[in-house]
Image: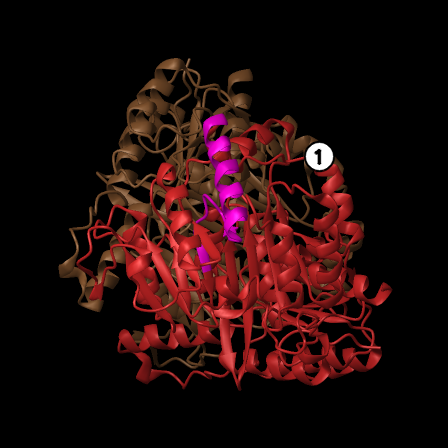
Chain colours: A brown, B red
Amino acid sequence: MPIPYGQGFGLKENRQTNMNAATGHNPLFDPFFDPRAIALMGASSNPQKWGFRILANILAGGYSGTLYPVNPKGGTLLGLPVYPSLHRLPGPADLAIISIPAPSVPHALTQCGEAGIRSVIIISSGFSESGPEGAAREQAVASLARAHGIRILGPNTMGVFSAKCRLNALMPPLTPRAGGVSYVSQSGNLGVQMLGWGELRGVGFSKFVSSGNESDIRCEDYLTYFAHDPDTRVIMAYVEGVSDGRRFMEAAEHATRAKPMIVFKSGKAPETRQAVQSHSGSMAGSYTLYRSAFRQKGIIEALRTDTMLDYAAAFLHYPLPKGNQVAIMTRGGGWGVVTADACRDKGLALATLSQETLETMNRVLPPYWSRSNPADLVATLNPEAFPVCLEALIRDEGVDGIIALGAESGNRAQALADKLQQMKVFESTEPIDRRGGPEDIHLAMDLMHAYGKPVILVSGLSSYAKAVAHDGRETVLFPTPERAAGAMAALWRYSRFRRRL
Amino acid sequence: MPIPYGQGFGLKENRQTNMNAATGHNPLFDPFFDPRAIALMGASSNPQKWGFRILANILAGGYSGTLYPVNPKGGTLLGLPVYPSLHRLPGPADLAIISIPAPSVPHALTQCGEAGIRSVIIISSGFSESGPEGAAREQAVASLARAHGIRILGPNTMGVFSAKCRLNALMPPLTPRAGGVSYVSQSGNLGVQMLGWGELRGVGFSKFVSSGNESDIRCEDYLTYFAHDPDTRVIMAYVEGVSDGRRFMEAAEHATRAKPMIVFKSGKAPETRQAVQSHSGSMAGSYTLYRSAFRQKGIIEALRTDTMLDYAAAFLHYPLPKGNQVAIMTRGGGWGVVTADACRDKGLALATLSQETLETMNRVLPPYWSRSNPADLVATLNPEAFPVCLEALIRDEGVDGIIALGAESGNRAQALADKLQQMKVFESTEPIDRRGGPEDIHLAMDLMHAYGKPVILVSGLSSYAKAVAHDGRETVLFPTPERAAGAMAALWRYSRFRRRL
């Protein structure tokens, strides 16, 4: 039985909407990720202050709700009237974002309580991450919030992003790409960096939250929310330490039954756990325990920060393979060997090609081609080779997935043609066959869709995974075969986990 | 005693020119890497043929010598007269490049012998990589060459590049960046791919050779040549298998005493050795044996293809550290933890910062900064923080090298300023401090030069290591801290090897 996944591969079947099925709403999280009106406390005209930068980002992001800058100085800011206090707002706000010095936060919270705002993001730092005094302040703020029935995101957070209402309440200036990944990060920097990389690498986000010190809402709460959120297709988490391991595992269990969940765990070495504590005030815990829990719950662990994005791109754009038998198609033997090594290293196997496949490929390849897997196209310049061989491989029943190298080589031929035309000597030659490149990529996407098998494309022309759109679908090209093999292995690990449920 | 290395760090002291010290010439390799005149046999007007593409590349590359296209059809090609045979050339050639079908190669070789050409590159494939018939053909060609006193590069090679005479005799259309790396690759694809990546990533090449089937000149011969070549500062090799292990180790021993040597070994898994054989006809051998030999001889092994380039960039642009005590400077705590984990993972240690260093940093950082290593600048917007802290760290005698994250963050502030100006609301705010970014990078380069300690910069803004030039020097920014830690570890491993000599 095939397990459909990825874009156009039966996404709807995987959606779970256990939360408030009658209304489709989530009373805890909607004000944070889909607020109707926001009061920004600490809005500032000074670009060196976060209260300015967040304001600017919300405006630049095109937030679909209403924004009320709040600052005792009043006046106007970036074209908006500034309100001296929450009591003077012209209408109700369901979310407050607080970006003022830590000692003033309790007073601001009291104001929120009085104004009926029950959801507050505390950007400010100077809480438990900064020592005993800050920890005491954080406890006081938490008690105060509870007394007012206020839920807190943060403190010490870099903010949130939500594609639904185009809310870009983040500190650094970036414009996240909208898409299917929802991401909770216990580091603001690791958070916004992934959003920034996502812009380049074809990974779009539905929701992002920098969870900060988690004085109230915790990493595992966001995970549970994402698990049930119909707009979230892939979950991503950067974890330094969790305070309630059982709830984390329960959240993960819900999540991975419905959709893939990618985790990067930091604070791995005993020596680095001290750094975790002075960063987010949490305990990193034993990495060995985390790893075994990840495996047990079907969580895909990324071992490097950039592979988080690789895996997210793979889950967004590729179907899950039914098995681990991979065919490698390459334009040169060396890369074939490297890719085969990488596949073996990551628990993938090399598919044995059928006689029919070999015969089809014989028809378009020089007689000295490898006749085995990796399928080396021996640098043929025949533009038929790539499409014919790719289709032969994907039709082969012994092949669960394909890693195809040199997908953009056709573009290289075009680069040569362009260069020669610049040299003005081109007229003396025969015309260059400009086929290949985009057509090869589009064909791979069409075949992947038709057969439901992943075809991971590698292009050495780009230095990072990049997005290509075609016929209403999108794919990403990987920059190295090692990263493609890593992505294929992640797809396979999750597929195997789902099959065993 | 400091071990100087890298750009501006006493390169001259590391040069060894054992070869023909009287003349500075190498009679075997000069015709391949600095030929005065080249006969291109198989020059073609058909862009689907390599005989056209190599011709076009040599012309587009601006080769400083004389090029004679040879083809029985005669006529002109890309503005040059075509000579029907070697006998008709108007002057002597010291190198022939043969790009014709394999069965015709023996005849072409005989022509070379008669014309007095003693150095021949055989591009053509269809030799030992293609089975028993091809292997017999290769042996016949080798005997014929010996009879004529001809040395052969190849067959089944993708060609050579040499910055000295701007010789770009390669099959794919690319323009390698000139620089200090010399690279021998047993895969043409792995070769030209690295040249292509080098264009993007600040890695320039002095010489490149795709060694092909190595019927005559072998990988280890090129390594010995590079070891003694004064233009080569860093050696890089892609190795599938070597036929004479002892000579390889001798070459490595010469090389690593003089300059760093980076090797990527493929055919690691037993299953992939078959693929090696059908690619280059060589035996991959036991990977365990290779690894222990690499360690023993001070060879820096790259475990992923893209880390080859990372290491090359590091050896080109950074001095060697005297020890493994690393200081990490970060703008956010999460990345600090990730970097610390990566350093520990790669055998680096976290330096203990001196009291003086901490006090200097106290002066520019908020009171709640980490006061330890990793030094977390806690996202301060004070533009003095980066330069002051960086200088404090590099002055610290307990610090052997620095990994500094967020070097381009100043640019992000500029991006925000630009975005707001586009929104035409900027006039209502105070001016944005645009310091940081380029200035921080230039400062890091100046400090590195002054103190002779590596300062590896990480910028999440780019997705690959990229080059920055300043004041006649150049550096590269790394895209992730994991890759920066890998580069630092490579510098340290080689430094330790040199110290133990």
As drawn, is A143 to the left or to the right of A428? right
Residue type at tag 1: Ser
> What residue is disc 1 on?
B286
Res. A153 visible in picture: no
Image spot of residue B164 (x, y percent): 48, 72
A106 vs A305: above or below = below
Residue B321 appears in view: yes
Image coordinates for residue A124, horizontal then vertical, percent = 57, 66
The answer to which of B459 and A384 lies nearer the viewer is A384
Residue B425 found in image quarter: bottom left
Q: Position of residue B269 (x, y in %)?
A: 64, 32
Residue drawn at x 44%, y 38% as measured from the top left: A314
Identify which residue, B138 or A10, lies in the foreground.
Answer: B138
Q: Is residue A149 left or right of residue A458?
A: right
> Seen in the image, is B38 located left or right of residue A279?
left
Q: Which residues are magenta?
A: B132-160
Q: Quadrant of residue B288?
A: top right
